[in-house]
Amino acid sequence: MERIAGLFRGKFTLSIVLSVIVGVTLVAAQSEIVPVRDILRGTNVFVFPSGTRTVSKKYVTQAKAKRTQQQRSATAQRVNRQYTTIAKTAPRRKRTDSLNPDSVTKIDLKIIPPAEASRIFAGVGEYHMDRGEYDNAIDIFRDALNLDAKNEAARGGLSEALALKGNELLANNTDTTSPHRFAVAQTFFEEAVKINPLNAPALFGLAEILSDTGRETDAIGYYENALKADKDLTEIYVPLGILYYQQGNIAKADEVLSKAGGISKDDPQGQYFLGLVRLQQDRINDAATHFDAARRADPTMEEAFYYHGEMQMRMGNLSAAVNDFKKAIQLRDNYFEAWYGLGTAYFEQAGSAGNDKRSQELYNEAAKAFERAKTLRNTNAEVTANLGDVYRQLGDFNKAESNYNLATLFFERQPDFATNKEVRDLVADINVRLAFVVGRQCEINMRNAVACKWDRAIRALERSFELKNDNMTYANLGWAYYNSGRSDINDKRDAQGREKIAKARDILIKATSSGSGYDQGVLLNLGMVYTDLGDHQGAVRALEQVVEREPKWTFAINELGLAHFNAGDFKEAASQFKKAIREDDKFAEAHYNLGQAEFRSGNVKEAQKAYDKLKSLKRNDLADRLRIFTRGAVKG
């Protein structure tokens, strides 16, 4: 492989991200072209998907939202309270006058007819109902019916007392024996409905029990029948709307919960689930409003704080998001989603920080949050992917690679991986990031005489291309083969290295035919491949296109100068090196290369100027090499 000894490629490191962002039609977001220092200290480029400052998965996949026992208790309390309030002014059954039991003398059934005694007992039952003494009311109404089975007031009173007693049991969340409590309540509801099939509180209670035991479709029927029986019992809209949401019927959930939200602004449960519906509808501002109402109505509701934080993050209010996530964690320290959200918010803040020091501080905070989330769910694919992103930004490329490896493993183990295009595309993207950090780690490995893992980068990119089949990945595969080939040659495996570089050429030629927005990066790599294969005119043609599109890419201009130099056109080589220097007067390698080109053109005075400049830049190493190259013609 022909190469002019002593010439230098650009000394840019991978940490320099070009300011040019190109729109890529093959990916959902934008991409960045990133320079990479290769094994011989040159610069080739990597096309990074979706930008370097984004996490792999911004929002974690949520488990199905469920109502807690406390929320069910609160609903039962609200339904009972609403029903009894309405019934005071508009009774839902036939009533009789209330009688204080102390005012009732001993009843002698030998004297008083059973029907009259039944009416007296019913009046005492009403007395207990008015005071919420449902156990006493049930006993008295039963006695009344035993005396007169036709007593409609007693019949209706017993049905109502059974229903309200059942809901009282549902509302008693201090009882930890929930299954037993629900079983007893169920017997009350079933008897109440047997007496009065249109008993709305009883139908509601049965719906709650069915919902709690997973019989959601049956529960919906009972909720709807309860509302048909009593349209004014609007508190039932909340649990009904929640069930529609849980079944994925967002339109129906919206219809029902909108009624509940408009009536019960202080109901944290209704506001919370209406917020979830708005989130599903991508109505982020409205969702934030409902989550805010939920957290105000119940300052202990950690889910409301979490989702309000997520909405703030979606709206770009990162500081507010951080505060919400911290509050959610304060309420429940093992809240995985909140730790995940906090890590993402810190990551986003770091990307927009005003200086590198603050950026690094925020990335460190993001790492702490994601690590905490990882301890809570150590096989979660999303958190390991994001940890890879954080460690990539912190420069810990080994940890980044380790977490990216875990992420791809966990994602590919998911049951629906073979058919889930969104996840397959994400894994393809993560594999590209994995290859990128292998390249970054290679820079460190070279300084420490440690072998680079280019074969791992190649496998990752081949898997990415297999999953997604896009041109950007294909272009990066050419980049990986090129660097792997140069690494082999550096380690005296010339035949193997030449084979890989030839393969890189073939891949890059195909990649440049796509007409993508990042062709200049692919052409730069192709030009360097042509140079290493000795096709100097091919290198010139490719690199001229790069410089035409990106006239401020100093490393590309320098590479074009090298191509002209290798082709024997020292005058044009000098012209390109001068252009690079005009863009960056401290580009020492370009000054060195210019000195060589001027000397080969016979311009010793110009070569001397290059030597003097290297001395002023305190690059005595390059100045000495130029002096040796010119056999002492330049000195000082």
Image: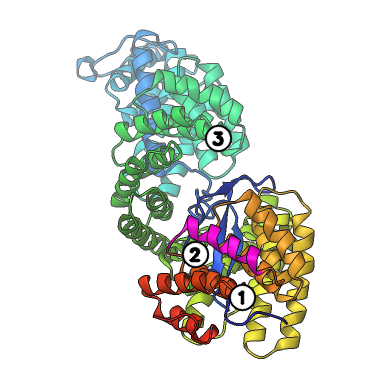
Label 1, label 2: how many angstroms apart (C-alpha)?
48 Å
> What residue do we see at 66% from left, 61% from top?
524
Between 40 and 203, which is closer to the camera in this rendering? 40
Q: Residues within 10 Å of mark 1 (few under 14, many from 20)?
A: some
Q: Residues within 10 Å of mark 2 (few under 14, many from 20)?
A: many
What amino acid is at disc 3? Gln
The residue wearing badge 2 is 388
Kind of element beneath mark 3: helix
> What residue do we see at 74% from left, 85% from top?
496
Visible residue check, residue 147: no
What amino acid is at disc 2? Gly
Label 3, label 2: how many angstroms apart (C-alpha)?
28 Å
- Which of discs 1 and 3 lies nearer the camera? The answer is 1
Q: Main secondary structure of the magenta part?
A: helix
Q: In which quadrant of the rendered view does residue 557 lie?
A: bottom right
Residue 519 coordinates in the image, percent (x, y)? 69, 53
Asked whether the residues under the numbered discs 3 and 2 touch, taking CB atoms below 8 Å apart as contact, a structural biologist would say no
Q: In which quadrant of the rendered view does residue 146 lie?
A: top left
The residue wearing badge 3 is 280
Q: In which quadrant of the rendered view does residue 461 lie?
A: bottom right
Residue 240 coordinates in the image, percent (x, y)? 53, 29
- Which of discs 1 and 2 lies nearer the camera? The answer is 1
Per the rendering, the mark at residue 101 is none
Q: Which residues are magenta?
A: 570-585
The residue wearing badge 1 is 600
In the rendered view, does 624 fall on the left or right side of 2? left
Visible residue check, residue 394: yes
In the rendered view, does 154 fall on the left or right side of 216? left
Kind of element beneath mark 1: helix
Between 583 and 181, which is closer to the camera in this rendering? 583
Quadrant containing the C terminus is: bottom left
